[in-house]
Amino acid sequence: MLTPLDIENKKFSKQMVNGYNVDEVDDFLDELTKDYAKLYKESTESKSKIDELNGDVEKYRTIESTLQSTLLMAQTTAEEVKSVAQKEAEQIIREAQNQAHSAVEELNTQIALKQKELEDVKKQVDVYKAKMEALLISQLELLKDVNKDE
């Protein structure tokens, strides 16, 4: 690509016959140089801006990729935490059920023992009543014998 300096320094050979007016050519080249310099500067600035924006786009793509990876990792971690929590909850429920079952069995055992103790006490009361009745009958017989002898 020609630079504005190339245009400005361009020299044309001059012809004597039917040549161009040197002042008009110089004026035109000056105007062309100014316009071309402006366009060249704008083009250079645009290329620089495009490079800068491409760099920004690449940076944002990297950030986007990182965010997607982070989001995916967060979702995976959340699923793992949820799974672990579910398993722990199930374990706690199983342990509570086992403890409740053990407590019920222990209470049933204690109830059976207390019922046996109650039966034993009832039998002892019955035995005591029978002994008392026998004692009272024997005492009554003694009193009758004592009364007969008198």
Image (cartoon, rainbow, N blue to C red):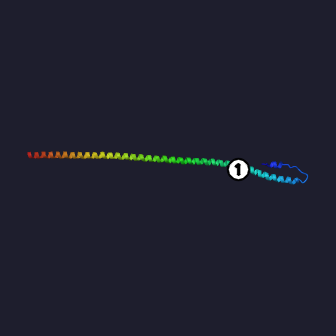
Q: Position of residue 30 (x, y in %)?
A: 83, 52
Residue for point 17% across, 45% down: 134
Closer to the camera in the image, 144 or 63: 63
Residue 150 shows up from this direction: no
Along the horizontal axis of the image, is 126 left or right of 43? left
Total numbered badges shown on the rendered structure: 1
The crowding category of the residue bearing disc 1, from other C-alpha atoms within 10 Å (few below 14, some 14 to 19, many at least 20), is few
Residue for point 83% across, 49% down: 8
Question: Please, which residue is most extreme toward the front here?
Answer: 17
Along the horizontal axis of the image, is 90 left or right of 26? left
Question: Please, which residue is most extreme toward the right here?
Answer: 16
Residue for point 81% across, 53% down: 32
Along the horizontal axis of the image, is 19 left or right of 136? right
Closer to the camera in the image, 129 or 62: 62
Residue for point 26% across, 46% down: 119
Type of the residue with mark 1? Ile
Q: Position of residue 114 (x, y in %)?
A: 30, 46
Along the horizontal axis of the image, is 3 left or right of 67? right
Q: Position of residue 126 (x, y in %)?
A: 22, 47
Closer to the camera in the image, 108 or 94: 94
User: What secondary structure is marked by label 1?
Assistant: helix
Residue 108 shows up from this direction: yes
Circle 1 residue: 50
Q: Position of residue 2 (x, y in %)?
A: 79, 49
